[in-house]
Image (cartoon, rainbow, N blue to C red):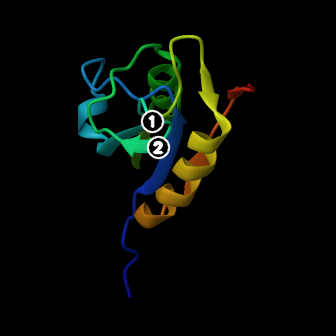
Amino acid sequence: MSDIKKNVKIAVIDSGINTQISDLKNYVIHSTGFELNSKGYITENCNVPVRNLHGTVVAMIIRNICSDVEFVSVNILDENLFTDGRILAYSLSQVFDFEPDIIHMNNIWLKVK
């Protein structure tokens, strides 16, 4: 019986991964974002711009350590790396649909009203 090589699927919940940098477009299998609309409801938007390169840098570091990865990019942070706690909780509930091996979140600051 031969071993089948499997990529490690990593969900990066951060500021999004800019796939135009380096070769990251070859490793991002899904990219989405969550934000609050004008009525205060959480909406999914696959076109949320990457406003801070933190998530991109995280993905590049992981990619340089391990080439057998695929990323699910989840953009929930603004340019100052802040988010709303409701968005964080909702993004976590949604990311499990992609069956990641690892969920990476770091330095997430929550806005408190």
Residue indicated by mark 2: 42
* Numbered mark located on residue 8 in the image: none
Q: Residue at the spot x=52%, y=48% of the render? A: 91
Task: Tell me the quadrant of the picture where the N terminus can be found.
Answer: bottom left
Left-right relation of 3 to 22: right
Relative image position of residue 93 (x, y in whole percent): 55, 59
Q: Nearer the viewer, residue 82 or 65?
A: 82
Residue occupying the far right of the picture: 112
| 46 or 37: nearer the viewer | 37
| Above or below, comparing residue 85 to residue 15 in the picture | below
Q: Position of residue 111 (x, y in %)?
A: 70, 24
Against 102, residue 25 (above or below) is above
Q: Is residue 82 above or below residue 41?
A: above
User: Quick one: which residue is furthest to the front in this view?
Assistant: 39
Q: Nearer the viewer, residue 78 or 40?
A: 40
Position of residue 17 measured from the top left corner of the image (x, y, whole percent): 39, 28
| Screen quadrant of the C terminus | top right
Q: Which residue is mark 1?
A: 39
Describe the element under mark 1 as helix, strand or loop: loop
Which three-letter amino acid code belongs to the residue tagged 2? Answer: Ile
Which of labels 1 and 2 is toward the front?
Answer: 1
Give me the residue at 33% from left, 28% from top: 48
Residue occupying image coordinates x 31% and y 30%: 24
Q: How many marks?
A: 2
Looking at the image, which is closer to me, 8 or 44? 44
Amino acid at circle 1: Lys
**In-image side of 113 versus 102 (left or right):** right
Q: Secondary structure at mark 2?
A: strand
Whether residue 6 is visible, yes or no, is yes
Tell me how far mark 1 sits from mark 2, CA to CA: 9 Å
Can residue 67 be seen? no
